[in-house]
């Protein structure tokens, strides 16, 4: 309920800001392509280090934004009620597209059309510059809008990762029985809330470093698993689209034969 509201609010305000500075759009795209493909050398090893930092930050922020390849968002997708894994997977693909190509592109264009990039020192805090971006475009109303959007994006992220952690804890302690799992989940929730409070006093650079490290540790085993299961994923996807095109073949809905039979029965039209 929160995500559609905050997304539409952000998209609407960003589009208004961009079209307010519509003459700056060509210059903004020129800056993007210029700095993406014409990296200016500043000498020797410094060049390689600086370029590596740019790539690392770009990749880490991109992954943090859309969670592609981490294996975290499938935990939320698995909680859906659909019986078709491919159908839910397509929503996952759309999620990455919307988050990266729509939200992030609008953010970049709003920033580049609002500010004179050459005048920025590069030392400003990202959050402060984002708030200033809204204030420049919408005055005091922009500050209010940002004060609504920023906490909502943070809050929904906190809720999502709490859900991921809860499901992971439940899986890790499943052999302890219902009572043991409940105790483990409650303990996790308490620790999670305490860490939220503690992290508020940590410098943002350290938070990003911890986040990037944790994301990398998640991505490595998940990407290996994706490669190992790529042939199976291709077969399941082909099975879904073949059935959508009218092929009379058994559906591939679950790796568990019993669940697959149950889901197949539920998919049959009710007489």
Image (cartoon, rainbow, N blue to C red):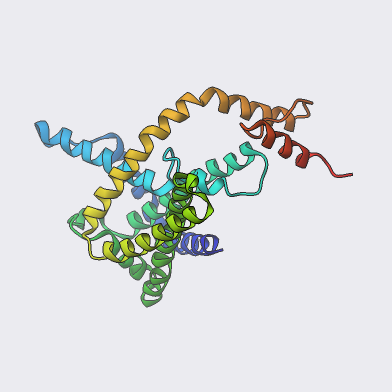
Please identify the quarter of the rendering in which residue 53 is found.
top left
Farthest bottom residue in view: 140
Image location of residue 21, percent across then percent down = 39, 60
Please identify the quarter of the rendering in which residue 49 is found.
top left
Residue 152's place in the image compared with 267, above or below, is below
Total label count?
A: 0
Q: Nearer the viewer, residue 90 or 130?
A: 90
Farthest left residue in view: 44
Image location of residue 197, percent across then percent down = 30, 66
Relative side of 149 to 202, left or right: right
Farthest right residue in view: 271
Residue 183 at least partly seen = yes
Quadrant containing the N terminus is: bottom right
What residue is rendered at 63% in x and 34% in y?
254
Q: Nearer the viewer, residue 236 or 56?
A: 236
Relative side of 91 to 271, left or right: left
Image location of residue 205, percent across then percent down = 22, 54
Relative side of 26 to 8, left or right: left
Q: Nearer the viewer, residue 32 or 103?
A: 103
Relative side of 125 to 233, left or right: left
Residue 43's place in the image compared with 180, above or below, is above
Quadrant containing the C terminus is: top right
Residue 76's place in the image compared with 124, above or below, is above
Residue 130 at least partly seen = no
Image location of residue 109, percent across then percent down = 38, 53
């Amino acid at each position: 309920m929160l995500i559609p509201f905050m997304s539409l609010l952000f998209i609407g305000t960003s589009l208004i800001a961009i079209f307010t500075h519509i003459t700056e759009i060509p210059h903004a795209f020129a800056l993007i392509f210029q700095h993406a493909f014409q990296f200016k050398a500043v000498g020797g090893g410094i060049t390689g280090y600086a370029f590596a930092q740019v790539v690392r930050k770009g990749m880490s922020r991109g992954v943090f934004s859309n969670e592609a390849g981490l294996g975290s968002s499938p935990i939320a997708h698995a909680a859906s009620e659909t019986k078709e894994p491919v159908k839910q997977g397509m929503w996952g693909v759309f999620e990455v597209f919307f988050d990266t190509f729509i939200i992030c592109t609008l953010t970049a264009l709003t920033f580049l059309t609002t500010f004179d990039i050459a005048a920025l020192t590069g030392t400003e805090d990202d959050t402060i510059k984002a708030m200033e971006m809204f204030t420049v475009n919408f005055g005091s109303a922009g500050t209010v809008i940002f004060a609504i959007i920023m906490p909502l994006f943070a809050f929904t992220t906190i809720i999502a990762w709490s859900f991921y952690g809860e499901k992971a804890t439940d899986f890790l302690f499943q052999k302890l029985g219902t009572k043991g799992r409940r105790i483990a989940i409650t303990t996790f929730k308490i620790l999670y809330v305490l860490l939220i409070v503690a992290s508020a006093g940590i410098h943002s650079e350290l938070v990003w470093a911890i986040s990037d490290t944790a994301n990398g540790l998640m991505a490595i085993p998940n990407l290996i698993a994706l490669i190992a299961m790529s042939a199976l994923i291709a077969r399941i996807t082909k099975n879904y689209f073949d059935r959508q095109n009218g092929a009379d073949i058994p559906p591939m809905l679950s790796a568990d034969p019993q669940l697959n039979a149950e889901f197949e029965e539920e998919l049959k039209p009710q007489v």
